[in-house]
Image: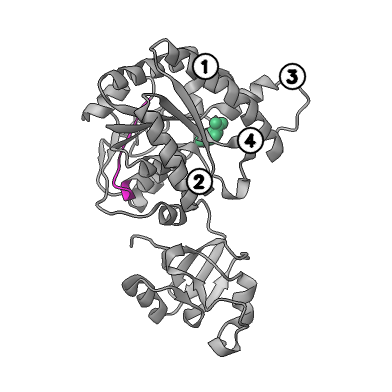
Amino acid sequence: MIIVIKIGSSSLTKAGKLFTPAIEKLCHEIAQAKKAGHAPVLVSSGATALGRTIFASAQVRMAEPAMSRAFGSAGQVALISAYERHLARHDSVAAQVLLAPTDFWIRKRYLRSRGTLHRLLELGAVPIINENDALADNDISFGDNDRLAALVAHLLKAEKLLLLTDTDGIYSSDPSVNPEASLIAKVEGIDHTLEQMATGSRSGVGRGGMSSKVAAAKIASWSGVETVIAKAARKNVVADAIAGKADIGTTVAPELRSISARKLWIAFAQQPSGRVVVDVGARKAVERRNSSLLAAGVVGASGSFAIDSIVDIADSDGTVFARGVTRWSQQQIDDHLGKKTSEIPDEISDEIIHKDDLALLPQ
Ligand code: GLU
């Protein structure tokens, strides 16, 4: 089976340095999975954390985005060379693939990434994926590697997504605060209650946290992929995840739906830049007839967004039922609201959001 395995910075590093036993264990288990005939694909964080330590003695401005990209750039070399060394001990070849969000939503790039990854698997190599941190754009980044791993699982039509972390899985509440907290072994559908249960990162290392694990599991689940959230340090975690052991951690069942990579990205984009409010007729047309969102159906907009931004689409009651990439800026909507098509300048499209750029959200 194709299994996408994601490991976070906090499981891989200690005090900003690579934690050798963790990488050794992971490479050993990956090699075992390969021997058993599976195709593991690794998504690894850790570059920025390692880079920060590499440059620790330099006088650097930590908070600057370009500086964090520079950390990622140097740290990635340290990270991938460690994987190369440890996998080589098991006669496995490490192959680095650095991705950007556009690799998922520009079809040509999407197909190209998929082609490369498939070839690597055919060659028996272990693809090791990270975001291209050196050039990452803060506004349109993956947010964290949990989401990136979920998108990769969709891209490869993987059978499983394994998110390796510091805890045993998703708890009913924070176990460090509440001794009554219990591990949730199986999730059938991710709802708001579960999203609220999962809190953010506690370690402060890396960008993920339990809430981003849940968000990633949701992407995977929408893609028809099962997610397993388990402790990185657990013995034979990879083999047990592949075998579907019941006590592995938290398993999130896949939904029976199929959604394109672009729509998946739109639906789960980090933070929408604003909101477009539509009337009842427009909601029906979008939801039931798969129509584009036309200017005539829009009754308002909020947030200040530019053309090509991702926005929520809500009805007048405030229910957000879809998301899309807008062809109008918020200013253009304000300027032309309520006008007839004939009064709108020709250079502006009649469609505020084209149907191909629109993803419905579960209600
Ligand atoms: N791409 C980042 C890195 O390798 C990690 C992002 C995350 O923590 O999820 O440092």
Q: Looking at the image, can residue 199 be seen?
A: no
The number of discs equals 4
Q: Please state the extent of the stretch shown in magenta in the rendering.
A: 221-231
Residue depicted at 39% across the width and 13% down the height = 91
Of the two numbered discs 3 and 1 on the same chain, state the one appearing first in sequence. Answer: 3
**For the residue marked with disc 3, what is the amino acid?**
Ser
**In the foreground, 281 or 172:** 281
Secondary structure at numbered mark 1: helix
Q: Are marks 3 and 2 in contact (CB under 8 Å)?
A: no
Distance (Cα) linking label 3 and label 2? 35 Å
Query: Is label 3 or label 4 in front?
Result: 4
**For the residue marked with disc 2, what is the amino acid?**
Asp
Of the two numbered discs 3 and 2 on the same chain, state the one appearing first in sequence. Answer: 3
Of the two numbered discs 2 and 4 on the same chain, state the one appearing first in sequence. Answer: 2
Residue depicted at 33% across the width and 48% down the height = 223
Q: Are marks 2 and 1 in contact (CB under 8 Å)?
A: no
Name the residue that disc number 2 marks.
103
Of the two numbered discs 2 and 1 on the same chain, state the one appearing first in sequence. Answer: 1
